[in-house]
Structure formats: structure tokens, C-alpha cells
Image (cartoon, grey):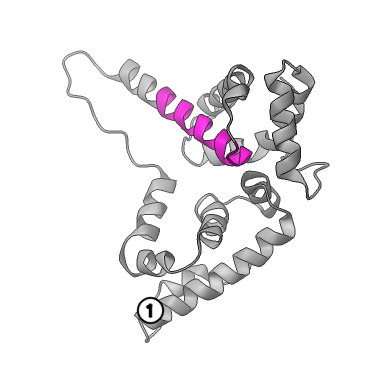
């Protein structure tokens, strides 16, 4: 595999079509296409995995395993967004790695312990329940996914664009719209303002 580079270098606005073409080439055994796909997506995948797992070596191994799986399974891709498909593979590999690590570290005769929730999971819980969750449910899915990428995962505009398969300008526009709509929904739920809206202040 090539050395990890920031995702989004040399990308144009036809990202999703390009990604689909690369996957078809990978399915045909084209290693150069796999390298190009890696260059496009490894940056944001690494960032997102790193926010779920603090162990850098595990993250590197999971990232490599993800693209090994892509090499073996590219032909199974069926029209879903390529970034989302890659994340499904990566997140499953991470869960497997964390479970394997927990089994190794568990002492004989002790009861299994649940994995501590990651920072992302804690933030997601805060977004999905209470007033914020109610407000989120009222905005469109494409705006929600931008908020998750930029607020929950902390991805840059370029990384979020690679994840979602949309241009960087669209990420910025949707992020601003999402914040406005979420703030308005929170104000309707809590007319006195509350603290939740403040956490979402600013622009992407």
C-alpha cells in the first residue's frame, strides 16, 4: 500500500462517479485503481477510525484490513455510495479488532467487561436523545449526515466531502443550512435558548 496521504488530493467534483469507476477496475484486478482509491479515502477513514479507537497501531491495521477487503470484495459493491460502503467495512473491522483485543486482555476466570463507549458514541448519544435528538429528526437526512461528519467525527471539509461523495462547497453549504435549521428547531423546543444551540454555533 502507498503511504497515507490526506484524502481529497487531486479530486474533482465527479467524485462519486470516479469512485464507482475505480471500484469496477479494482474488481477486475487493477492494483493501480486500488492505490488511487486508497489515496482518495485513507485520510478521512484514518481520522474517523482514530476517533473511535485511541490505539494508533490498531487503527493502522484496521485501515490496511479495510483495503484488503476492498480488493477481495469490490465486485460485491452494489450501487451504494462508495464512501459509505468503505466506512461500513472499516467500522466492522474495527469492532472485530476491539473485540479480539478485549478477549486477549481478559484474565481467565473474570467476567467479560463491556467496551467503554468511545467519544463518538457518547456524542452520538447526546445528539440522538433529548431536545437535540428531537430537533435533528426534523432536518433532512443529507443535512444530518453532514453534521455527523463535521461535528461528531470532527472531519475537515475535505475529509467530509470524501466520505459523503459530494463537492467541498456542498459540504460547507449543507453544514451552514444544518446549523441554522437545527438552531431554529431547538429554539422552537426551548424558546428561552438553552445551552444546546450554543454548542452548534459558528460555521463550517
> In the picture shown, does residue 175 fall above or below 21?
below
Tell me what residue is drawn at x 69 percent, y 60 percent.
170
Tell me what residue is drawn at x 55 percent, y 68 percent.
178
Tag 1 residue: 194
Instruction: Look at the numbered disc 1 and give the secondary structure of its residue.
Output: loop
> In the picture shown, does residue 55 fall above or below 32?
below
Q: Quadrant of the N terminus?
A: top right
Start and end of the magenta stretch?
A: 79-97
Answer with left or right where residue 86 lies relative to residue 138: right
- Does residue 90 show up magenta in the picture? yes
Residue 204 seen in the figure: no
Report x, y in % for residue 70.
61, 23
> In the picture shown, does residue 171 fall above or below 34?
below
Report x, y in % for residue 168.
72, 55
Answer with left or right where residue 19 lies relative to residue 104: right
Residue 177 seen in the figure: yes
Q: Residue furthest bottom?
A: 192
Report x, y in % for residue 40.
73, 36
Between 167 and 196, which is closer to the camera in this rendering?
A: 167
Residue 63: quarter of image:
top right
- Does residue 60 show up magenta in the picture? no
Tell me what residue is drawn at x 37 percent, y 86 percent.
192
Pointer 1: residues within 10 angstroms few (<14), some, or many (20+)? Answer: few
Q: Quadrant of the C terminus?
A: bottom right
Q: Taken as a whole, is the magenta stretch helix, strand or loop?
A: helix
Residue 95: quarter of image:
top left
Tell me what residue is drawn at x 60 percent, y 16 percent.
72
Report x, y in % for residue 76.
57, 25
What is the count of numbered marks?
A: 1
Amino acid at each position: 500500500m502507498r503511504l497515507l496521504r490526506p484524502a481529497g488530493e487531486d479530486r474533482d467534483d465527479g467524485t462519486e462517479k470516479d469512485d464507482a469507476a475505480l471500484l469496477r477496475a479494482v474488481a477486475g484486478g487493477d492494483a493501480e485503481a486500488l492505490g488511487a482509491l486508497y489515496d482518495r479515502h485513507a485520510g478521512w477513514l484514518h481520522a474517523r477510525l482514530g476517533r473511535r479507537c485511541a490505539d494508533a497501531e490498531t487503527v493502522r491495521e484496521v485501515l490496511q484490513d479495510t483495503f484488503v477487503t476492498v480488493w477481495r470484495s469490490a465486485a460485491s459493491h452494489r450501487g451504494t455510495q462508495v464512501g459509505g460502503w468503505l466506512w461500513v467495512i472499516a467500522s466492522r473491522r474495527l469492532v472485530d479488532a476491539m473485540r479480539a483485543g478485549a478477549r486477549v486482555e481478559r484474565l481467565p476466570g473474570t467476567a467479560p467487561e463491556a467496551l467503554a463507549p468511545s467519544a463518538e458514541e457518547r456524542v452520538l448519544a447526546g445528539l440522538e436523545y433529548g431536545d437535540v435528538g428531537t430537533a435533528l429528526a426534523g432536518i433532512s437526512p443529507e443535512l444530518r449526515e453532514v453534521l455527523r461528519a463535521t461535528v461528531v467525527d470532527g472531519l475537515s471539509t475535505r475529509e467530509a466531502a470524501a466520505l459523503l461523495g459530494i463537492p467541498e462547497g456542498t459540504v460547507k453549504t449543507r453544514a451552514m443550512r444544518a446549523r441554522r435549521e437545527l438552531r431554529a428547531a431547538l429554539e422552537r423546543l426551548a424558546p428561552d435558548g438553552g445551552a444546546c444551540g450554543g454548542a452548534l454555533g459558528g460555521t463550517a
